[in-house]
Image (cartoon, grey):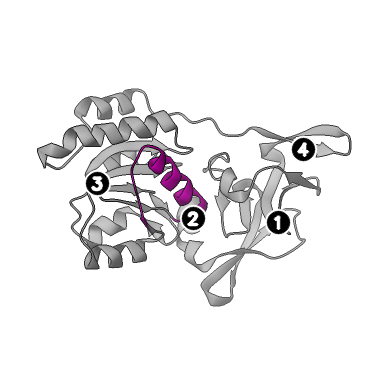
Amino acid sequence: MNVIIIEDEKPSARRLQRMLSAIDINAETMLHSVEEAVEWFQNNTHPDLIFLDIQLSDGLSFEIFDAVDIKSAVIFTTAYDEYALQAFKLNSIDYLLKPIDDDDLKTAVEKFKNRAPQKQAVTLDFNDIKNLLVNPIEREYKKRFSVKVGQHLKLINIEDIECVYSENKGTYAYTKEGRNYLLDSTLDQLENELEPHVFFRISRKFYVNVNAIKDMVSYTNSRLQIKLNTYNEQDVIVARERVKDFKNWLE
């Protein structure tokens, strides 16, 4: 079976690669952006199965299908459920929410194997779509963090956090009371824990809370600078490749 992974977060791609290896599936090819994927598909034999993240660093992965006629089956892997119905219109086997569960992954792969001999466009059946509409996917996100302060543990509510950022190999939450707290999680791990309608990852270094944004101004190289209510320890800059998605997120 020829399998590839398209995922912009390299740690997540490597984790999925290891999970697939554990069930005897070798996914040697890993792509990380819409542009890279389009170029690859234009110059290579298409695989049997694609594991595809929806939100890539330079756009939504649906743009790949607009540029290239892809016949491969697809298993979507994403932290967001709002694109499920759009995914069903493509050659979708399944739609796995991150963090991916081992059993869910095995079930999706078995579903592909059982349908593969039919040599037809593979789609989720009508009952799957009906069940999603009747019982939409609900996801629990973090409501608070517990942090160590001296010999004590302190609870920080999510709504009190203006931004989360990485510095000197540590991850910090900055609260509206003007304090920094060291977290146990990395920014990549927080991708699946922070409410996506409230927090947006504007760069490799920063997540910002939409409710803490005071102002936005143009910055060099087509970027944006974010002004938060109280945080002013360093410039908060939206990376150029994330500006378009950030503006869409704000709306």
Mark 3 highlights which residue?
1
Residue at image mark 2? 10
The residue where tag 4 is placed is 147
Number of other residues with Cα within 10 Å of mark 4, as a class: few under 14, some 14 to 19, many 20 or more: some
Q: Which amino acid does label 2 sit on?
A: Lys
Which structural element holds mark 3? loop
Q: Which residue is drawn at 52% across and 51% down?
A: 11
Which residue is drawn at the image coordinates 53% and 30% (left, top)?
Answer: 140
Image marks 4 and 3: residues in contact by CB distance under 8 Å: no
Q: Give the range drawn in magenta.
A: 8-29
The 10 Å Cα crowd at callout 2, few under 14, some 14 to 19, many 20 or more, is some
Q: Are marks 1 and 3 in contact (CB under 8 Å)?
A: no
Q: Where is residue 241 in the image (x, y as percent from the top left)?
A: 48, 65
Q: Where is residue 81 in the image (x, y as percent from the top left)?
A: 40, 38
Q: Report, in whole angstroms, how far the alpha carbon at label 2 lies from the one at label 4.
A: 27 Å
Q: Does the magenta stretch include residue 170?
A: no
Rendering coords of residue 138 (x, y %): 45, 28
